[in-house]
C-alpha cells in the first residue's frame, strides 16, 4: 500500500507540475533533462551499501537488478515493477 501511495503521489505531482508550471528556458531545460539519471543512480548505489561497508541483503540487490533490467524502457513504472519483481524473487528463493 505504501508503494502504491508513493507512486500515486509521484505521478500526481508530475501531472500537476506539467499543467500549472511554465516551461523553463531552453538552456535550463537541457540542463534539467540530464539530472534525473545520475541522481537516481547515485541514490540507488547508496542504498546498496549498509553500515559498516557491507552490501545490502540479497533481496535488495535483486530488486536493484530488476529495476536496472527495466531501465532501458525509460519508465518509472517499469523500473518499479522490475524492482518489485526482483525483490519478490529474492523473497521466494532466499
Image (tube, rainbow, N blue to C red):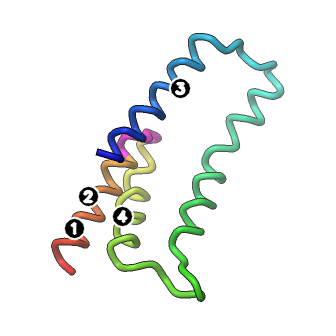
Residue 79: mark in rendering: none
User: Is 77 inside the magenta-drawn segment?
Assistant: yes
Disc 1 secondary structure class: helix
Label 3: few (<14), some or many (≥20) within 10 Å? few
Check if mark 2's residue and mark 1's residue have beta carbons within 8 Å.
Answer: yes
Disc 4 secondary structure class: helix
Q: Which residue is mark 4?
A: 63
Seen at 63% across and 44% down, the residue is 36
CA gap, disc 2 and disc 3: 25 Å
Of the residues tagged 1 and 3, which is closer to the observer? 3
Seen at 37% across and 38% down, the residue is 5
Disc 3 secondary structure class: helix
Residue 63 location, x and y as percent?
36, 64
Q: Which residue is mark 1?
A: 89
Q: Which residues are magenta?
A: 74-78
Q: Which residue is mark 2?
A: 85
Q: Which residue is mark 3?
A: 14
CA gap, disc 4 and disc 3: 24 Å
Residue 4 location, x and y as percent?
33, 40
Amino acid at each position: 500500500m505504501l508503494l502504491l501511495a508513493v507512486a500515486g503521489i509521484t505521478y500526481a505531482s508530475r501531472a500537476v507540475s506539467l499543467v500549472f508550471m511554465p516551461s523553463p528556458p531552453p538552456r535550463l531545460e537541457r540542463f534539467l533533462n540530464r539530472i534525473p539519471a545520475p541522481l537516481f543512480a547515485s541514490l540507488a548505489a547508496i542504498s546498496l551499501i549498509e553500515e559498516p561497508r557491507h552490501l545490502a541483503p540479497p533481496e535488495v540487490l535483486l530488486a536493484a537488478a530488476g529495476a536496472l533490467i527495466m531501465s532501458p524502457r525509460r519508465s518509472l513504472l517499469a523500473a518499479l515493477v522490475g524492482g518489485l519483481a526482483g525483490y519478490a524473487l529474492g523473497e521466494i528463493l532466499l
